[in-house]
Image (cartoon, rainbow, N blue to C red):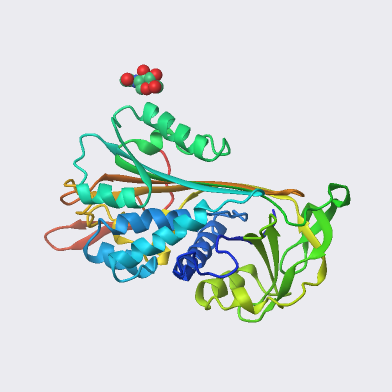
Amino acid sequence: MWKLIVLFSIVTASPIGFSGVDLNPINQFAFKLLNNVYAFQDNFGQKNIAISPVSVWSLFALLAEGSTGDTFIELMRELRLPNDLRGTQDLHSALLNVLRSNDGDVILKGQSAMFADQTLNIHQEFCQSANYYKTDVYFVDPSNSTRLAEDINYYICVATEGRIREAVKAKHLEQLRMILIDALYFKASWTHPFDPTQTKEEAFYNSQGKTIGAVNMMYHKAPHNTGDSNLIGAQIIEMTYGKSEQFAMLILLPFDGMPLSRLLDNLATQPLDWLSEFKSGGNLPEIDCYIPRFKISAQTDLIPPLQYTGIQRIFDREKAELPGVSDSPLYVSKTLQNVEIEVTEEGTIAAASTVVGLEDRILGQRFEANKEFVFVVMDRSSNLVLFSGVYAQPEIV
Ligand SMILES: *[C@@H]1O[C@H](CO)[C@@H](O)[C@H](O)[C@H]1NC(C)=O
């Protein structure tokens, strides 16, 4: 098991979209989410992580348009949405512009869809917002979840060029009234490819300098932007794609002795000035560059990390406020993301699918002892406690 942190700068040379809109609010959300996903997965001993924060951002920004009350306030704050709808839509079109850009050596395409229960009365305004976000809208009969899973998987498989074939299983879709999907596909060659004959097996270390395994280390000597950022505590290299060099992968290596979690904390809390701080400017030096060949396939339940991030109400099955979406009260019960990324001598192929499922809200009170609890047996007239205990280790009896 080895740890590596990889970032896609979906943002080009400067964080300003074509329309002059500042996309940094999306990046701030992205680094906070990455930090929380890491903190959460680390608890389960899972070390390699790959997420597509921009997909999550765009699906929840759409849902924000149908939300009110605390649900809306949390989404505005954590997605860093502008205060007016017009500003949000501008941010979204700037994003779509980036996702549409294409040159010969780089393919990047994003696609999104809404599969809604045909018996659900979706508000016209919400369909218009979906339309504005270039989301295809399908009305379906969700009662056969096997067929619905096939349809969704087919949509995602086509959108990701066959990279993600089983994004959802039928059991994920039971009870769902509405499903929002975002699919992203990226394929690009390095501006300076690596020579496969130079690739050699090498040791890989943890932050204490202890060998924890081996990788196929690629090597080349090529001009790259590289430097240190004291703001976040990392040595950074920027490796560009294609002739136009509009896209790049950044690799952030924590300073010696600094744990990866510190770097992720810094990324989540520091201003984004480091994105320019490490660049030297002028003629780029020729760098001896060693990068492992790697592949990560990850499926992540994003609800716990989004909750850590401060988005809670929309997942609350009693209190979520989404009156702008439909007449039936709904809440978000699923947020699953599949990401596959492969980095080789030639370049990078990455695909992501994000599935957000909405269910009918639970109206009325409910008590479900499905987590650790305390129990007490007592005499009701005297309040005398006869037995008490904790149930924390589940067991089928
Ligand atoms: C559900 O869909 C599957 C796959 O399309 C089909 O084989 C099955 O017969 C359907 N089940 C029902 C109850 O209609």
For this view, does 110 lie left or right of residue 238?
left
Q: Does 273 sit above or below residue 145?
A: below
Q: Residue at x 80, y 60 (%)?
A: 290
| Residue 397 visible (yes or no) | no
Q: Position of residue 320 (x, y in %)?
A: 25, 56
- State which quarter of the image contains the C terminus: top left
Q: Residue at x 65, y 48 (%)?
A: 104
Q: Does 264 sit above or below residue 107?
A: below
For this view, does 349 lie left or right of residue 94?
right
Q: Position of residue 14 (x, y in %)?
A: 56, 70
On the image, which quarter does residue 242 sit in?
A: bottom right
- In the image, 227 versus 41, the foreground residue is 227
- In the image, 164 versus 93, the foreground residue is 93
Q: Outermost residue, right direction?
A: 197
- In the image, 80 versus 362, the foreground residue is 80
Q: Position of residue 60 (x, y in %)?
A: 36, 56
Number of marks in the rendered image? 0
On the image, which quarter does residue 151 sit in?
A: top left
Q: Outermost residue, left direction?
A: 381
Please state the quadrant of the image where ligand 1 appears: top left
- In the image, 178 versus 314, the foreground residue is 178
Q: Position of residue 282 (x, y in %)?
A: 74, 77
Q: Residue at x 25, y 66 (%)?
A: 70
Q: Does 144 sit above or below residue 366?
A: above
| Residue 378 visible (yes or no) | yes
